[in-house]
Amino acid sequence: MTKNAVMREIEIREVCLLAGKIMLESGAETYRVEDTMVRIAASYGAESAESYVTPTAIIFTLEGEHPTKTKMIRIITRGTDLNKVALVNNLSREIHNGKWTVSEAYQLLKEIEKKNVTYPIWIQIFAAAIASACFVIMFGGRWGDFLPALIAGGIGYSWFIYIDRFVHIRFFSEFSASLFIASCAVSSVYFGFGEEVDKIIIGSVMPLVPGLLITNAIRDLMAGHLIAGLAKGAEAVLTAFAIGSGVAVILILFS
């Protein structure tokens, strides 16, 4: 096996792993990550490639006539950034069409990894506040609870972002945010500013509910990725438990 062939295999493997890492950190389903990595390898002429993806690790192997090369990377942080998932998917299609060399694709993936394509924080908070208020009406609440839910949802989501920056334990961030939301809801009704505590709380915690995580867990289970599906399902249950616990603490204290 020539030195150039070895280097090319390493480059292909690094491109595939980086693409998978970006997608998994951005909230993509595990079966989509595995499929994208294998397709990129095939586009560059790799004879056989296998990938095994879980929510916390990626194992990728290039297999052929030469000794098998396997590498594993850990996934520490996970979030939701569908724009990055779309960018990597688009790049994968361009690679398949022969538009980029291995080194060019690697540089483009590094740029996507560093790129901050999320909305500014003030827009995220504003959207969470509006969504909270609208969910109150959708769940049969009264228009008198629209403004309290808007304020509670906005404050709760702001606190969630603030705490998550310093305490990298998602359970604690969600628990403390739900404490704030329930406190705002109870206070608004106590002072005559709102009408129904339950409707305000239900609407305001909706931006914290892991909808994408639940959807991905179900899709992974349906695709036969049982370990990844169960792991994501457990993470969603833990998030729901954190939100429910925070609300329960406040309701017990003020009952």
Image (tube, rainbow, N blue to C red):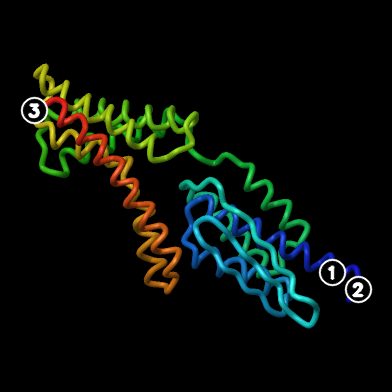
Residue at image point 33% right, 31% down:
176
Q: Secondary structure at mark 1?
A: helix
The residues bearing labels 1 and 3 have C-alpha atoms spaced at a distance of 69 Å
Tell me which amino acid carries mark 3. Glu
Q: Is residue 98 left or right of residue 89?
A: right
* Disc 2 to disc 1: CB gap under 8 Å: yes
Dot 1 crowding, Cα within 10 Å, few <14, some 14–19, many 20+: few
Image quadrant in which you'd find residue 135: top left
Which badge, 1 or 3, is on the more N-terminal residue? 1
Instruction: Please state the horizontal and vertical placement of residue 144, each as a whole percent of the image.
Output: 11, 28
Of labels 3 and 2, the one closer to you: 2
Amino acid type indicated by mark 1: Val
- Residue that appears at 57% across and 39% down: 116
Q: Which residue is mark 2?
A: 2
Spot occupied by residue 85 in the image (x, y as percentages of width and height): 53, 54
Q: Is residue 124 above or below residue 236?
A: above
Q: CA distance from mark 2 to mark 1?
A: 6 Å
Q: Which circle, 1 or 3, is nearer the viewer?
A: 1
186 displayed left or right of 41 = left
Q: Residue at x 51, y 61 (%)?
A: 54
Q: Are marks 3 and 2 in contact (CB under 8 Å)?
A: no
Dot 2 crowding, Cα within 10 Å, few <14, some 14–19, many 20+? few
The residue labelled by disc 1 is: 6
Seen at 72% across and 64% down, the residue is 13
Amino acid of disc 2 = Thr
Residue furthest to the right: 2
Give the x, y percent position of residue 48: 68, 79
Secondary element at tag 3: loop
The residue tagged 3 is: 195
Give the mark nearer the N terminus: 3 vs 2.
Answer: 2
